[in-house]
Amino acid sequence: MELAFGYQGALGAWRKFDQTTPDKQVLECNAGWRAAHPMIKKTWYALQNAAINAVKNPGETYQAGHPNRAVKFKVSGSFLWCLLPSGRALCYPYPKILPGLYGDELTYMTVPGADTTHIITDPHNASRWARVGTYGGSLMENVIQAICRDLLVHVMLQFDDVVLHVHDEIVRQVLLAHAECARDELEQAMRSPPAWAAGFPLWAKCKIMERYGK
């Protein structure tokens, strides 16, 4: 349920993981999950409304989230910018608000992926450049992935012996005699959020291994 419903998915998202549960039961699970996570549901729409308002009012800034950790949307030039708490920005090229199934829909141009299904007709569409629609849950996924990337990189830049990272894992290559110290340093760093993420509940457990493994 966390993977299927966390970013505003419903039956279609569930079907990517499971093909056997009856539709009625999936929809009941979806309704229950949303009822149990009202703040997540609220954030979907806060992000969506902030982004749409920014496109409708170029040059004006709209934000969503806690005031001390909000993300901010603003149109400048041909792009919709999403400023993250870290100070880094996400970019949505050539944004446009179009009528959608549930009201105003935010759309933008991008390189479509293999799983892109919501391509919108646009005279500038090409095989590797097309207009797509998005919504609050998808914007939330973008923001969360970006923030987690920034937290990871904040730690990686503290060490000059990092040789690899895999998703949320960081690998340091050190001499065996320094392994325990290096492990403790990395563990402490990964549990300590940067100033812009003060209070963020981070935790990590590091291992000493002769070669990379899970």
Image (spheres, rainbow, N blue to C red):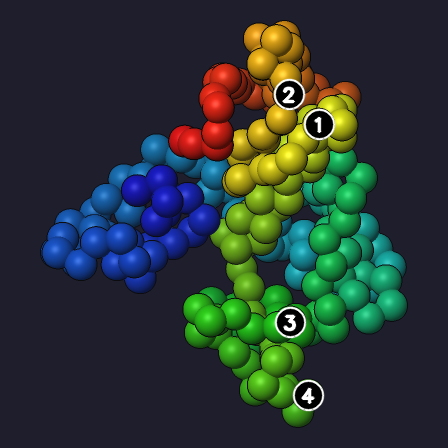
Q: Mark 1 and mark 2 in contact? Answer it, CB < 8 Å.
A: yes
**Sequence-first disc among 2 and 4:** 4
User: In the drawing, does residue 42 fall left or right of residue 111?
Assistant: left
Question: x, y (%) of residue 12?
Answer: 31, 62
Tell me the element at label 1.
Answer: loop
**Sequence-first disc among 2 and 3:** 3
Question: x, y (%) of residue 69?
Answer: 70, 31
Residue pointed to by mark 4: 124
> Crowding at label 2, few (<14), some or many (≥20) Cα neighbours within 10 Å?
some
Amino acid residing under circle 4: His
C-alpha separation, residue under disc 2 versus residue under disc 4: 51 Å
Residue pointed to by mark 3: 110
Choose mark 1 or mark 3, whichever is in front.
1
> Crowding at label 4, few (<14), some or many (≥20) Cα neighbours within 10 Å?
few
C-alpha separation, residue under disc 4 versus residue under disc 3: 11 Å
- State the residue in front, 134 or 49: 134
Tell me the element at label 3.
Answer: strand
**Sequence-first disc among 4 and 3:** 3
- State the residue in front, 214 or 131: 214
Residue positioned 37% across, 44% down in the render: 3
Amino acid residing under circle 1: Asp
Residue pointed to by mark 2: 174
Choose mark 1 or mark 4, whichever is in front.
1
Residue pointed to by mark 1: 161
Residue 200's label in the rendered image is none
**Sequence-first disc among 1 and 4:** 4
C-alpha separation, residue under disc 1 versus residue under disc 2: 7 Å
Choose mark 2 or mark 3, whichever is in front.
2
Residue positioned 62% across, 73% down in the render: 111
Tell me the element at label 4.
Answer: loop
